[in-house]
Image (cartoon, grey):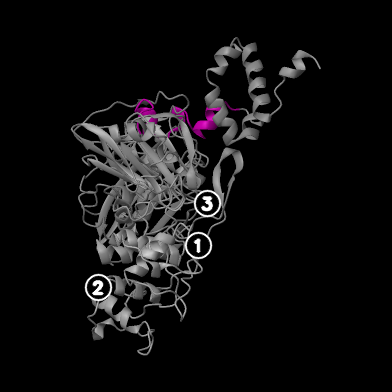
Amino acid sequence: MTTADTDRPTSLPQRAVDAIARRLSRRGLTRRSFLTRSAVVGSALALDPTGLLLRPRTAYASVCGEANEFSEGWSAFCATVNNNNGNVCPSYSYAAGWWKIDNSTFCSGRARYIVDCNRKPNDTCNCHAADGQCDHRRVCCNNFRYGQCNTHISGTTEVVCRIVLCTPPWQWGNCTTTSRTSNTTRTHWSAALPSRTNPTPIKVRWLEMGLGASVLGDIVGSEKSAPEGGSWARFDDGVMTYQPDEGTKMVRLDHAAKYADLNGPAGRLGYPLQDHEYNSQEVRYQYGRTYRVDGTIRVERYPFRDVPADAPFFDEIMWLHGAGITAGCNPPDNDRFCPGRSVTRGEMAAFLVRAMDLTETSEEGTYEDVPEDSVFAEAINRLTTAGITEGCNTDNTKYCPTDHVRRNEMAAFLSRALELTATSPEGRFEDVPQDSVFAEDINRLATEGITRGCNEDGTRYCPTEEITRAEMAAFLYRAFA
Amino acid sequence: MELHAEGMRMRLPRSWEGRIRRNPSRTRSAVEAPGPGGDVQAQGTTDQASGEDQRPVAQVANFVLPAALDDFGAQAVALMDTGHCFVALLEYGEQEAGSALFAGSLPRRLTPDDFSSRQLQRQLPDQLGAQFFGTEGGRAFCLYVVVAGRARLATTLESVNQVLSTLQLEPR
């Protein structure tokens, strides 16, 4: 194999770029100068490789679509007019109307919306061609109005330029729902806009915020992948994240700088829970928060990777950890709580002993199925010495430490631990028979407000269901916090 | 030929043709694919766009109109030759009716002074346009007229005005 063979590009886009460069070099344009424009060519190839190669038009025309010259009569894109710095109406214009393009891949198969920005009646602008890389359409030339936005402004002025949205205009701004369609304009585009084919959700939201003119400023580098099938990107003045189920969220300014330093959603804080409001001093994430103290952004990390801030019983589990009742479920790292795992009777003993700060042990506190070297032996002994358990069999010789705790047993444990006595008619549940050995303990728990049942309307207790560690945290919080 | 639908009525001279239609609510697609000529169009339709309000559009012309036609007739005006004219009457919603933009009523007679080469959705050589907004019978409308051939404007306007003089808009 020769050196030339080794260097020969093999992919279609590579071969195409090379071939175009050779043709241009015959016209006096070097490969080097051609490659300075390769981003545009690359976009063109991604959009329409065969069209670019087989039809007599330029790469720029493929990016900007049909009728992209002044003489062809259409209005330019605001992203072009704003010097590649904003998908927004220029200050001397206002949203005057909109149309839609059906079934656009740019908007994931939904309609793409175009909003015309017309000159404000008291401002001036002169008709000229846009100075884009390939969008040379008209600026301030066409006196025309679609007429569904800001209809309190009478008359028709020149269209300055047009912006692109995936959000329906009546949700975006002061526009009505009257629909007008122009599928003819489907390919119209600007090199200053993101790729027309399947842009990422982050790119679409950034576009709708105004691109470089948005509060986030320009994008820095490329998007990075993140856990749970998501992604994130840095901007001059913020960070935007995307999760398939939650959509996009943004963090701004110095909170974002700290968050990005911690590797964004791929780091220990996880995804932000909501958009960061400009004046907010705190941003909450799945696994922590950033907050401002004396002008400095500080970070608090929540202890467990499997308990995000929006998880059920988050506050109760945080209390459990803060009170020293649990360190985690995966020693020695202990960065997980295992909230969905069923609680064993051995673990239950450890939790209750720590919650109640029991210290006394006795000879009576031993069981034949609890070895002396068991990590739970001392806790089971203390629980027994305090009279909260007597074992799991009739002659009280066994504790069954690996059995899962059921909700009815939990009621018995807590009722005894708290020495509850009061009962009430409200403490009854339809799935707890009056002659159940646990009926009274369950009633006491409900009467004290430690349980509200297991269904929405509080009519059932689900006595035989195993209790999870997260539910146990809730029980203990209500009982001891 | 008389055109009558959606509360709009007009009589067309010989050699004219037209239609009154209401766009179907288009829907989200299941499959996305590049269309012809670098076009990017999702294939297949099923899911109604949320909340948009489809209103009737009347489109008439003294030449053969293409089957696929945007609301303001972009495909039609690209085919126009000297002496051709295209008229679109588009209804808007209750939200627009009576607003500042839609104040007043629609003209039934146009003069050459109403037309300009700048009053066009898409400026094409030797085409002139006029656009009017108004509210009649509680209904908001936009009237958009394109004529080709400045030299024959007066003659072309005669037939446009003949059509407009028959225009009746039934109250809501």
Name the residue at the right extreme.
A1
Name the residue at the top extreme.
A28
> In the rendered image, which quarter is residue A352 located in?
bottom left
SS label for mark 3: loop
Residue hosting label 3:
B68
Q: CA distance from mark 2 to mark 3?
A: 68 Å
- Amino acid under disc 1: Pro
- Residues at marks 2 and 3 touching, judged by CB atoms closer than 8 Å: no
Can residue A88 be seen from the camera position used here?
yes
Residue hosting label 1:
A371
Q: Quadrant of the C terminus of chain B?
A: bottom left
Q: CA distance from mark 1 to mark 3?
A: 84 Å
Tell me the crowding category of disc 1: few under 14, some 14 to 19, or many 20 or more residues within 10 angstroms, Cα based.
few
Viewer-nearest residue: A275 or A43: A275
Residue hosting label 2:
A449
- In x, y percent, where is residue A406? 43, 73
- In x, y percent, where is residue A388? 34, 72
Counting residues from the start of the chain, the first of labels 1 and 2 encountered is 1
SS label for mark 2: loop
- In x, y percent, where is residue A81? 36, 28
Which of the two marks, 2 or 3, is nearer to us in this view?
A: 2
Considering only vertical position in the picture, is A81 above or below A251? Answer: above
Viewer-nearest residue: A71 or A26: A26
- Amino acid under disc 2: Gly
Considering only vertical position in the picture, is A120 above or below B20? Answer: above
The chain letter for the residue carrying disc 2 is A
- In x, y percent, where is residue A251? 32, 39
Q: Report the number of numbered marks.
A: 3
Looking at the image, residue A20 sits to the left or right of residue A237; the answer is right
- Residues at marks 1 and 2 touching, judged by CB atoms closer than 8 Å: no
Which of the two marks, 1 or 3, is nearer to us in this view?
A: 1
